[in-house]
Amino acid sequence: MAKAPVLTPQSEDFPRWYQDIVAKAELADNGPVRGTMVIRPYGYSIWEQMQADVDRRIKAAGAKNAYFPLFIPESYLTREAEHVEGFSPELAVVTVAGGKELEEPIVVRPTSETVIGEFMAKWVQSYRDLPLLLNQWANVVRWELRPRVFLRTSEFLWQEGHTAHVSEADGRAYAVRILHEVYESFMRDVLAMPVVVGRKTAKERFAGATNTMTCEAMMGDGKALQMGTSHELGQNFAKAFDIGFQSSEGVQELAWTTSWGVSTRMVGGLIMCHGDDNGLRIPPRLAPVQVVVMAVREDDAVIDRCRTLAEELLAAGVRVELDLRTETSAGRRATDWELKGVPVRLELGPRDLAEGAVTLVDRIAGSKDAAPLDGIANRITSVLDAAQATLFAESLARREARTAEVTTIAEAVEAASVGWARIPWADLGVAGEVELGTQGITVRCLVMPDGSLPDSDDTPGAVAIVARSY
């Protein structure tokens, strides 16, 4: 009898394949409340790697971490009309606490522009206090009607940056800096994902923003995923919360603010961008475990050499896990490591040891060959570098192959059935965007032909990236 596949094949049912990986690679489970998730240790270790790298980049851009309350007075949200209107359907509201009905309902944080704006107004007095560059790592709650683990959950983890500036130009420059130097570079260089960086249309703009910029990635099924956003908020929140300062000329002025964030949605993007029918494929620069050293069977000499090998790799700066679970078959363990997407597996048995070699399994290249134990650390470094480059090249090739240049709405709809479409914004326009929306297709962003950001929705020559999305 043929052995049943561990995962549903992507070509058969991509959403089911995704759910299979989440469960069988031990990434997460559904929480007890609909729309929530329990992130398991291996899934959380991937998030920790993301968090550490993004946090380092945010700090390099000058922002400092702080923490603000989970509970926000409902009145704070109502001060910025467009903001509260945009979030109203997603809000979770507390009306009873301590056994008593509250005088004012409390909103469970959907995002923190309002509460941070309240304290910016308190902390900013003079132009010397600006720019004020804040970031927080937190959980947020947005009630989700169609939940999917990591992609859309009622509670998720993220970072949200919030800044205040002396001028519109300064705020815009910082929002763009975060977009490129933090988000795009992290996604390209660590996640191995070639994101398109563009401007959201007015219809897709963050509630209360004057401009939203985005990083969009193509998934394995051709759909788009919004990986992160950076917003110019103009003076909308400064007006609502009186974030004012005395200028160098002694004039009282309003600040210009920004906000920006990425979330655990990036874990979902990682799965769908790089995963295959054998499971996850994690880029080496991200992987919590870059190499697993696996003893094939119980043998004292093999066990000792596995330990020494792991120590050698650790000393070379490689993230290693030692698998000495010889009571479980080597085949079963190999399948589990394939599912988890560890880039390299080193399998050592008595025969390998006698020959002074180890079996090197390259998860990304899909190869398996004998490698000399002497100098293995140098070999591993080159294999990891090649794997990182391969994943990026494959993702870029897929995006280019499945992106069509079109000029009509009908052509855009056809292209969006298998991938993305690029259509001149002048040919599509707001009316065309609405028409596409009736078929579940959205304008992911606007870009210039050379890949730069348009200055506005009306910039001549702008191109719309059109796709179905998660």
Image (spheres, grey):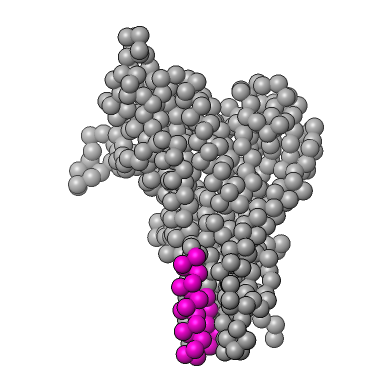
Q: Name the residue located 43 percent from the left edge and 51 percent from the top edge.
A: 52
Residue 174 in the image: x percent, y percent?
48, 29
Image quadrant in which you'd find residue 256: top left
Locate residue 376 relative to residue 300 in the image: left or right: right
- Reply above or below: 186 against 244: below
Our reading of the magenta stretch's main secondary structure is helix
- Reply above or below: 9 against 399: below
Q: Name the residue located 38 percent from the left edge and 32 percent from the top edge.
A: 133
Residue 392 in the image: x percent, y percent?
65, 52
Residue 237 in the image: x percent, y percent?
40, 24
Query: Which sits in the foreground, 111 or 348?
Result: 348
Quarter holding the N terminus is bottom right
Q: Which residues are magenta?
A: 293-316
Image quadrant in which you'd find residue 20: bottom right
Q: Name the residue located 47 percent from the left edge and 23 percent from the top edge.
A: 170
Q: Name the residue located 63 percent from the left edge and 73 percent from the top edge.
A: 361
Locate residue 263 relative to residue 388 in the image: left or right: left
Image quadrant in which you'd find residue 363: bottom right
Locate residue 322 relative to residue 363 in the image: left or right: left
Q: Residue lying at the far front in this picture: please name it.
A: 374
Query: Which sits in the foreground, 91 or 246?
Result: 246
Can residue 30 be spotted in the picture? Answer: no
